[in-house]
Image (cartoon, rainbow, N blue to C red):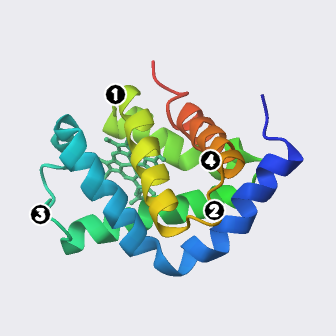
Amino acid sequence: MPLTASEKAFILNLWPKIAPRVNDLGGDALDRLFLSFPQTKTYFSHFDLSHGSADVKAHGGKVLSALGKAASHLNDLDGALSSLSDLHAYNLRVDPGNFALLSHTIQVVLAINFPNDFSAEAHAAWDKFLSEVAEILTSKYR
Ligand code: HEM
């Protein structure tokens, strides 16, 4: 089910607050991913995964910036995420189950940092948005 107009508004309203802090917020989401779900570290054996490392922050920034690009193309998520979808399916071959884990830690970070914005409705909208992103990034596996 595509995002509704009000769900899109929850994504667009929060994004400008995330944008200036992508490295810190994305880095925190990855820190939590690696601590809570250590099996996800296997994909990043070439990174320094220690708490708050430059590698983790830089990569967290890339992940959230990709979500920002998606947020600015809510009517064409497939197109906006096409090359990332190729990368995750053909090159990285990330097990699709990991996307729900990252989606979870991203939402934890949003809830902690933006408690006034992250209402139950906003939470549901972000969960749906992240599920759509994950579906696209895992759509080309074969
Ligand atoms: C690379 C986004 C989920 C593993 C990347 C890059 C972006 C990105 C933007 C960098 C691409 C580039 O440098 O051209 C996302 C988004 C995700 C997601 C938006 C879902 C919300 C995951 C998950 C995993 C993963 C769940 C595994 C647990 C990787 C790895 C790389 C990568 C291993 C390459 C890192 C490197 O060597 O620099 N991802 N990703 N991604 N992603 Fe994802």
What's the residue at 52%, 27% (across, down)? 140
Q: Compared to 128, does 25 lie above or below?
A: below
Pointer 2: what residue? 69
Q: Amino acid at mark 1?
A: Asp
Q: Amino acid at mark 2?
A: Lys
Which of the marked residues, 1 or 4, is nearer the chain's N terminus? Answer: 1
Pointer 1: what residue? 95
Foreground: 94 or 128? 128
Pointer 4: what residue? 123
Query: In screen coordinates, is 95 left or right of 65?
Result: left
Which of the marked residues, 1 or 2, is nearer the chain's N terminus? Answer: 2
Location of residue 90 in the rendering, given as x and y in whole percent from the top left corner: 40, 34
What secondary structure is marked by label 1? loop
Which of the marked residues, 2 or 3, is nearer the chain's N terminus? Answer: 3
Separation of residues labelled 1 and 2 (CA atoms): 23 Å
Q: Amino acid at mark 4?
A: His
What's the residue at 16%, 59% (across, down)? 47
Badge 1 vs badge 2, beta-carbon distance below 8 Å: no
Separation of residues labelled 2 and 4 (CA atoms): 19 Å
Q: Compared to 135, does 41 lie above or below?
A: below
Badge 2 vs badge 3, beta-carbon distance below 8 Å: no
Separation of residues labelled 1 and 4 (CA atoms): 25 Å
Does the beta carbon of the residue at mark 1 sit less than 8 Å from ligand 1? yes
> How crowded is the residue under tag 4: few (<14 C-alpha within 10 Å), some, or many (20+)?
some
